[in-house]
Amino acid sequence: MVEGNFDWTFVRIETDEGIRGLGECFFAPGLTCILRSLEPLLIGEDPCDIHRLFRKLQLATSGAGSVAGIVYNAISGIEAALWDVLGQWLDAPIYRLLGGKFRDRVRVYADCHGGEALESLDEVLRSRAASWEPQASAHTARDYFGEAGGGSPASPEDYRRQALKKRAEGFTALKFDLDVPGTEGFDPHNRVLNNRAIDQMVSLIGAVYEAVGKDTDIAVDCHWRYNASDVVKVARELEPFRLLWLEDPVPPNNTAALKEVSSKVRVPIATGENLFLFEGFQEIIAQHALSIVTPDLQKVGGLAVAQTIAQFADVHTMPVAPHNISSPVGTLALAHFCAAIPNFLAVEFHASDVPFWNDLVEGLPAPMIQKGFISVPEKPGLGVTLNEDVARRYARKDEPFFE
């Protein structure tokens, strides 16, 4: 487990033929304990039976309620490592195992947070002094979802500066948070916005649009904080900026609220990072309660599950823009997936301020993201190996390191 801007948890599967497969899990409390519990279920199995082993892990955890939940954070990382094993064994890149590619390069959008770098957060979204952060000793911990979010109010100039910076790096799509200090309502718990908060949101995104909006797509994120009627007010105010999407306006498991928002505004609504398995997406896609589907492959159940979701979304003419806060390992697995589906839009990049991000893997030219795109690798399996020296340097000291 490596301390990036989030915890990056790597899974390695070793076979008796000397193949090592690498996968990545989304963070969760107690994640490494779950992985250790699942390990005996794989010993002695054929790693090429990916779908059967997925079902085995799923059934083994069914008594713990595995219709959804953080057990899939663990299973998703294991499943990705199995694809890496299979690709190496067959001497083929993962995208070929998924049916071949529609594109050679995968478009990446930069998550610009709240106009400044996102600090490092632990498994319960509490900020911490990561070893790679400047002035770490002066850090004051706070809760990401704490009252008023903490910190100083964001300014339009902060957003404008960050937009220009990322556009200069070659990104053609950017995403900014709306739920930042200065945009909260009077009560941090009731999901209600006031007019002052809405006006501040509009001023922030207006500054971005004025700076780069003519040649750059802009998306915004609400992190499921608000009620449907107030988000409708926000979205209508933002309509002149022709947003790429408005993400997670309301809790994603509330289909009725999602449908209310999407039916009343002319801004595409995106959601999906906190949903699990195909069943988590089936109803909202079928009812067109959203416009853009955003599964997270490090917790949705893995690459095969995500491909099923993408196929169903394609039937309903919806693009897929995967959520992604992972290291280069998870990001590259996503690149294989995004190359192999027809209805891909863009994939998230969330770690531009982590100085060792590109150093964590070996086997590809650095940087992995060049001018806002990832070239899909042709090497077998995932196409990279973990740089264990770098991983050890930034590993969490209270967690195991493979052996």
Image: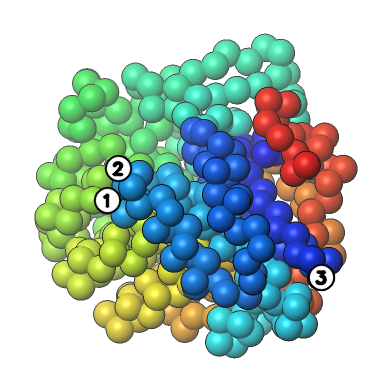
Q: Position of residue 176 (x, y in %)?
A: 45, 46
The three-letter amino acid code for the residue at tag 3 is Glu
In terms of depth relative to the viewer, which is nearer, 124 or 304?
A: 304
The three-letter amino acid code for the residue at tag 2 is Trp
Closer to the chain start, of discs 3 and 1, is 3
Name the secondary structure under disc 1: loop
Residue 222: quadrant of the picture: top left
Residue 82: quadrant of the picture: bottom right
Q: Residues within 10 Å of mark 3 (few under 14, many from 20)?
A: few
The residue labelled by disc 2 is 224
The three-letter amino acid code for the residue at tag 1 is Pro
**303 relative position to 170: left or right:** left
Q: Residues within 10 Å of mark 2 (few under 14, many from 20)?
A: some
Name the secondary structure under disc 3: loop
Q: Position of residue 150 (x, y in %)?
A: 44, 20
Q: CA distance from mark 3 to mark 2?
A: 46 Å
- Residue 363: which numbered mark, if any? none
- Residue 17: which numbered mark, if any? 3
The residue labelled by disc 1 is 252
* Quadrant in which the C terminus is drawn: top right
Tag 3–tag 1 contact (CB < 8 Å):
no
Q: CA distance from mark 1 to mark 2?
A: 7 Å
* Quadrant in which the N terminus is drawn: top right
In terms of depth relative to the viewer, which is nearer, 218 or 58?
A: 58
Q: CA distance from mark 3 to mark 1?
A: 43 Å
Count the marks.
3
> Which marked residue is nearer to the observer: mark 3 or mark 1?
3
